[in-house]
Amino acid sequence: MSRITEIKTTLDGIRKEFECELLKHERDELIVIYRMREDVQLEDLLLRKHTLSLGYFWEERNYNVYHWVDDNRQTLALYFNICDNTRISTNRIAWRDLTVDILITPDLRCRVLDEDELPDDIDDDLLRLINTTRDLLCVDPAQLLREFDISSRALLAEV
């Protein structure tokens, strides 16, 4: 697998980079894999060190998603980042994080995270985009879990 850099920029301009392995790159979709380097606690979910994170990115969608799976390739959660300005190339993925995230767990809970962190002076059009995307992602969590479980299992079977 080849290496690829994920570059995330927040609304306030903070930039973070992650080195990932490229799993799949098609015209309008890029999928990477990353193994967590330490335990991460998110809400009531503990992601252990070495949890696999499959990141799905599209230039034409206002979100990306991390599908977190355990060593038995069982879904731990889906974590959607509402975003814009996603740009994909052969050696990097760059995107702007629009703060609000959606956490979906196998028990079908769909939690909206970090809405309270949106700036008070956020542009009205950007806020509409965030709210519309949030609402879209929360409609059918069971379908999203099925969709990404099938996709990730197929990809991991090839690795």
Image (tube, grey):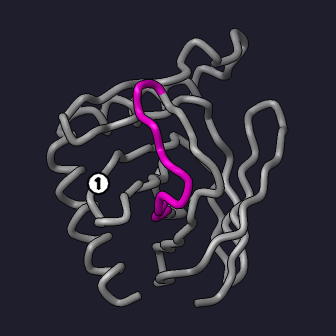
Q: Which residue is at the front of the view, 49 or 76?
A: 49
The residue positioned 64% from the left and 18% from the top of the image is 118
The residue positioned 83% from the left and 39% from the top of the image is 14
Magenta part of the protein: which range? 43-55
What amino acid does circle 1 point to?
Thr
Q: Quadrant of the C terminus?
A: bottom left
Give the x, y percent position of residue 91: 72, 80
Give the x, y percent position of residue 152: 32, 70
Q: Quadrant of residue 102?
A: top left
Residue 108 in the image: above or below residue 87? above
Q: Quadrant of the N terminus?
A: bottom right
Residue 114 lies left or right of residue 117; in this view the side is left
Residue 48 falls within the magenta-colored stretch: yes
Say how many tags the image has.
Answer: 1
Residue 64 in the image: above or below residue 55? above
Q: Quadrant of residue 94?
A: bottom right
Label 1: state its secondary structure: strand
Give the x, y percent position of residue 55: 49, 62
Residue 156 in the image: above or below residue 81? below
Q: What residue is disc 1 on?
A: 75
For disc 1, the neighbor class at 10 Å (few under 14, some 14 to 19, many from 20) is many
